[in-house]
Amino acid sequence: MKRCALARAHNAELIEDAERLAASGYYAGFCFHLLGGWPDGELRQLADGGMVDWTAKLLGNAKEWLLISGCGVEGLVALRREGG
């Protein structure tokens, strides 16, 4: 699969969890989480995003979906402070 090859080329891991419970009440369907490795070996979430139906509800059009994402800069700052 192309997705897996792209992840490998960038030393990243792609995991699909079709039965996820995290953020299931917030994102409608597809969502992603970007994790970063800390010097202690722990993985911490740096960013997330996914599909939301806010625009469909706002405009009264079921075809209007929006992909949103956000990055918590405090995680990047913490990583920098810890020597990552």
Image: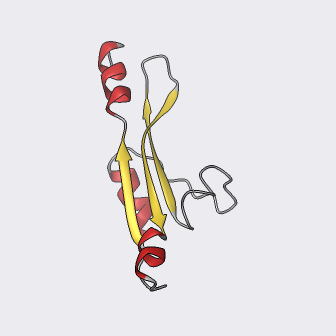
On screen, residue 35 above or below 16: above
Residue at 68% x, 53% y is 21
Which quadrant holds residue 47?
top left
Q: Position of residue 73 (x, y in %)?
A: 31, 32
Q: How is the image coloured?
A: secondary structure
User: 20 or 9, which is in the foreground?
Assistant: 20
Residue at 66% x, 55% y is 20
Number of marks: 0
Residue at 49% x, 31% y is 44
On screen, residue 47 above or below 76: below
On screen, residue 19 above or below 8: below
Which quadrant holds residue 3?
bottom left
User: 12 or 44, which is in the foreground?
Assistant: 44
Q: Quadrant of the C terminus?
A: top left
Residue at 33% x, 52% y is 9
Q: Position of residue 18 (x, y in %)?
A: 65, 63
Q: Position of residue 4 (x, y in %)?
A: 45, 60
On screen, residue 2 above or below 59: above
**Horizontal side, residue 71 vs residue 56: left or right:** left
